[in-house]
Amino acid sequence: QVQLVESGGGLVQAGGSLRLSCLASGNIFSIRTMAWYRQAPGKQRELVAISSSGSTTNYADSVKGRFTISRDNAKNTVYLQMNSLRPEDTAVYYCNARIKSEAWMSESTYWGQGTQVTVSS
């Protein structure tokens, strides 16, 4: 069994910063990608940033230059540093990972429970 647990959300004023963390635990053989998604009220869930095992990162256009995704592979943890936050960044942020539990198994997709980020104007 694999779990993803996020932390670090909260309320911040526009222009402020927050750092989200997501720890993957359980039966883990390898993690190929770790990513952050977000879902605002009334909107579809969208990809914010993704980190691949080869250190490749990609970002949504709306957060480029403001958000940074990073991974600590030894700790099975992914971070999202969010700077220059805007009210439109308000959403529930979800951690996502593609994980193999055993070498012979195919990958499965896992989601965290979500953490609320609220940016006030």
Image (cartoon, rainbow, N blue to C red):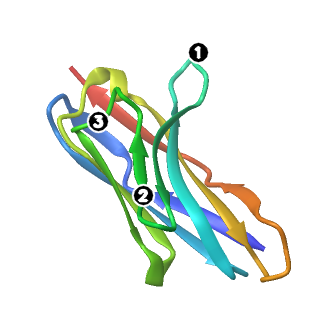
Choose the circle earlier in sequence order: 3 or 1: 1
View extreme (left): residue: 15
Give the class, few, some or many, for how many residues have Cα within 10 Å of label 1's Cα (few <14, many ≥20): few
Please give the label number shown on residue 56: 2
Amino acid type, label 1: Gly
Identify the residue at horizontal 53%, vertical 59% (top origin).
Answer: 34
Residue 32: % across, % down: 60, 66
For label 3, the residue is 64
Amino acid type, label 2: Thr
Choose the circle earlier in sequence order: 1 or 2: 1
Please give the label number shown on residue 67: none
For label 1, the residue is 42
Question: Marks 1 and 2, how far apart in space?
Answer: 31 Å
Q: Single out the mark in the foreground, 1 or 2.
A: 2
Residue 85: % across, % down: 23, 33
Q: Nearer the viewer, residue 54 or 105?
A: 54
Snapshot quadrant of residue 103: bottom right
Q: Is residue 54 above or below residue 10?
A: below
State how many labels appear: 3
